[in-house]
Amino acid sequence: MREAPPVLTEFHIGIDDTDSRLAGCTTYTAALLFQELVSQGFKPLDFPWLVRLNPNIPWKTRGNGALSLHLSMEDGRLEEVKKIAVAAVERTSDLNQRATDPAVVFLKGLISNSLREFSARALHDILSVREARQIAKDAGAEAHLLKGSRGLVGALASVGADLDHDHTFEIIAYRTHEYIRSVRKVSQNSVRLMNEMYQGSTFNNVDPETGRILICPHGPDPVLFGIRGENPVVLTEAFNQVDVGEPIERVMIFKTNQGTDAHLNCPRTVQALRPYQSAIIAGKVGDAPRRIRGGHVIFGTIDETGTIDCAAYSTTGDVRDIALQLIPGDSVAVSGGIRPRPLGELTLNIERLKVTRLVDAIRWENPPCSKCGARCESMGKGQGFRCRRCKLRFPRTIRIRKLDGRTIRLGEYLPPPRAHRHLTKPACRYGISLPRSPEKHNLATKQTLESLVLIPRAA
Ligand code: ATP
């Protein structure tokens, strides 16, 4: 008699908070673990997920990234996988730093709706560890915490993330240990060339205004460079165009919510805003924009519940320039992070500015004297006019209404790529129709997953 095929179960692993500003990177932990599991015969259901969460969390290390792996496997091997995963996290965590609280979450079976909802909120809210514990308990997830418990929020949220709809990919090359503290040896010319060749299918390689290379981080983490784009196969081709002058320890492709604006899909009212949320406020410009020290621009946005100061920093380029041209009464949708100021008031730091309606820019001119034609002078605030020469007086109602032409256009304005957050949807991705077709996704997954996860690369 033939043996019955083994019953396979979905098994999910979430990881977060393994790194510090001085060492490590949670993507590296996930790459290492993924490659170890694949080399031991475990079957991934997808690329590892690099899930960026609320970028306004004050205690994040860099880009608030959490990672999850998704496998299909026999129940009998679950304990083995857990052991491998915990060992990989222990090996790669920077436990010496106070703020590093590594967490690994294991979840067998389908993702519950409450976990999905928790993950969605982790993109734009601050969530408590207490809630994370409850969600983990309800979902039947097992948590392994190496130190404190803060990492649980991100580890759990990455498991329940929604990457079925919009998503992108990033191919990341990691450095060998000996090179970690040296300047990254990546040929800038080859990156520029790669950028030209793969424009449209990759994004944020080079800042167009300054020519700055954006694919290399600058800190002491193990990432040598990462290329972001739409398709894993094209990303490997782009990757092979980059000339590198140091050994590459490993390469991994991640499926990710980077470049999707996933954190900016939550319209809120001014009254409901809380510190460190990501939010969209639709309203009217209240106070006229003012320029402050450093070249930043501040203006008030009013909705039916209140007013909030919105800040367009000088680094936001176009966004700052457009903000300066707004006038009271214009309609806008401002998206960004909510920051508390010292006295408790809130400011929205603009990441995306949509101008939806422009009012007429009206200028009032003093009338000419009806006798001599000279320009009259005002007799004071709210008063009428008088001609200096003829001494004639005129009522205020005869002042002349002029319309100033406005150069600003309706539309959506973004900062330049050098000022983007990981989640910012770049201009080149606007118009990419969503959701993606499932066939396309499956094809990319089936054909490339096995061959791409362990890309050999000579130094
Ligand atoms: P890197 O991007 O370099 O991997 P990071 O910027 O992701 O680092 P972490 O070291 O992971 O920073 O720290 C972020 C911490 O914030 C984690 O402990 C995570 O669990 C927690 N966290 C993430 N999102 C939220 C959220 N929405 N609410 C509360 N805590 C969160």
Image (tube, grey):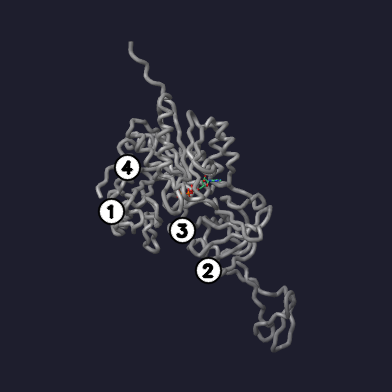
Q: Earlier in the sequence, mark 3 or mark 1?
A: 1
Query: According to the image, label 2 marks what residue?
Result: 295
Tag of residue 293: none
Query: According to the image, label 1 marks what residue?
Result: 246
Q: Nearer the viewer, residue 149 or 406?
A: 149
Asked whether the residues under the numbered discs 2 and 4 touch, taking CB atoms below 8 Å apart as contact, a structural biologist would say no
Query: According to the image, label 3 marks what residue?
Result: 419
Q: Which of marks 2 and 1 is nearer the N terminus?
A: 1
Give how far apart the Cα atoms at labels 2 and 3 are.
15 Å
Secondary element at image label 2: loop
Q: Nearer the viewer, residue 57 or 326?
A: 57
Give how far apart the Cα atoms at labels 2 and 1 are.
40 Å
Q: Neighbour class for label 3 at 10 Å: few (<14), some, many (≥20)?
A: some
Tag of residue 233: 4
Quadrant into which the N terminus falls: top left
Looking at the image, is mark 2 or mark 1 nearer the viewer?
1
